[in-house]
Every structure is written in structure tokens, then in C-alpha cells.
Image (tube, rainbow, N blue to C red):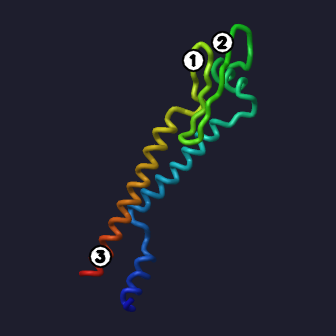
């Protein structure tokens, strides 16, 4: 590799990140924050029954409550759904987390792809130009 080309690459590595790199990084950081919010929403210090009944009714136990069936949880996208025999279900994770997480991940990947394509094209122009 010629010395001038090495110098150009060294100078390019010192430059500040481009807009697409920043968008990708910020979107990835927001994705992590949203995922952690979803995971923390799933945490409970009590058993599933008390957590779900308290979330639905505002008190942990009492007469005349419909029977609690189960808590279904999954880690991606974060979800913790409480189910009762009367057909009611309640997700403990806020409803905006999954769509926002999907949007942020998509933007992050798209921005990373745009950055890679731009760098590859810039490299080819410098190589052949």
C-alpha cells in the first residue's frame, strides 16, 4: 500500500463520525434503553399471582376476584402477559416499548448499512479516481 494512501486512511480515521454513524449509534443506544425499560417492567418482587392481581385490581387479594391462570413472559420483545379465567389479559410491559424498540433497531441497522455503502463507494472512488 502506498505511503500516501496510508496517510489518507490515517487522516480519515481521525475525522469525526458522520451523520449516519451518529444516527445508528443513537438509535442503538435508545434501543438498549427501551429494552431495559421493558425488562425492568417484567421484574416482580412477589409471586406471579400477587404481581398480576395487584396490577389489575390495585390490591393484592380479595373475595370475588376471577381466578388467575398464569403469567406468560418472553424476553424479545419484552412481554409479561397476565391471564385470568374471565378472558382478561394484561401486559405488564408498557405498550409503546415493543413498537419503539422495533423502529429503533430498524433505523440503527438501516443507518449502519447506509454508512457501510457510502464508505465502500468512497473507497472505490478514491481507488479508481
Q: CA distance from mark 1 to mark 2?
A: 9 Å
Q: Which residue is mark 2?
A: 66
Residue visible at 56% across and 45% down in the picture:
35
Residue at left offset 38%, top offset 61%: 19
| Along the viewing direction, whichever of 79 and 60 lies nearer the viewer | 79
Q: Residues within 10 Å of mark 3 (few under 14, many from 20)?
A: few
Query: Mark 1 and mark 3: span between their CA atoms?
Result: 59 Å
For the residue labelled by badge 2, is the local secondary structure a helix, a strand or a loop?
A: loop
- Residue at far left of view: 129
Q: Which disc number belongs to residue 121? A: none
Residue at disc 3, secondary structure: helix
SS type, badge 1: loop
Q: CA distance from mark 3 to mark 2?
A: 67 Å
Residue 124's label in the rendered image is 3
- Relative to 13, does residue 55 appear above or below in the rendering? above
Circles 1 and 2 in contact, beta carbons < 8 Å: yes
Tell me if residue 93 comes above or below residue 90 in the rendering.
below
The disc, 1 or 2, on the residue closer to the chain's N-terminal end is 2
Res 122 → quadrant: bottom left
Q: Taking 78 as reference, is 120 left or right?
A: left
Residue 97 % position (x, y): 52, 38
Q: Which image quadrant for residue 127?
A: bottom left
Task: Name the residue carrying label 1.
Answer: 88
Of the two numbered discs 1 and 3 on the same chain, state the one appearing first in sequence: 1
Q: Is residue 68 above or below residue 27?
A: above
Outermost top residue: 64
| Outermost bottom residue | 3
Seen at 51% across and 48% down, the residue is 31
Amino acid at each position: 500500500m502506498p505511503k500516501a494512501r496510508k496517510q489518507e486512511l490515517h487522516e480519515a480515521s481521525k475525522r469525526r463520525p458522520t451523520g449516519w454513524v451518529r444516527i445508528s449509534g443513537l438509535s442503538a443506544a435508545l434501543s438498549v434503553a427501551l429494552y431495559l425499560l421493558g425488562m425492568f417492567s417484567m421484574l416482580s418482587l412477589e409471586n406471579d399471582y400477587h404481581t398480576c392481581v395487584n396490577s389489575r385490581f390495585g390490591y393484592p387479594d380479595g373475595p370475588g376476584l376471577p381466578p388467575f391462570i398464569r403469567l406468560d413472559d418472553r424476553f424479545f420483545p419484552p412481554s409479561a402477559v397476565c391471564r385470568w379465567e374471565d378472558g382478561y389479559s394484561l401486559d405488564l410491559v408498557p405498550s409503546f416499548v415493543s413498537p419503539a424498540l422495533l423502529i429503533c433497531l430498524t433505523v440503527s441497522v438501516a443507518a449502519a448499512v447506509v454508512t457501510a455503502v457510502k464508505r465502500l463507494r468512497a473507497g472505490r472512488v478514491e481507488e479508481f479516481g
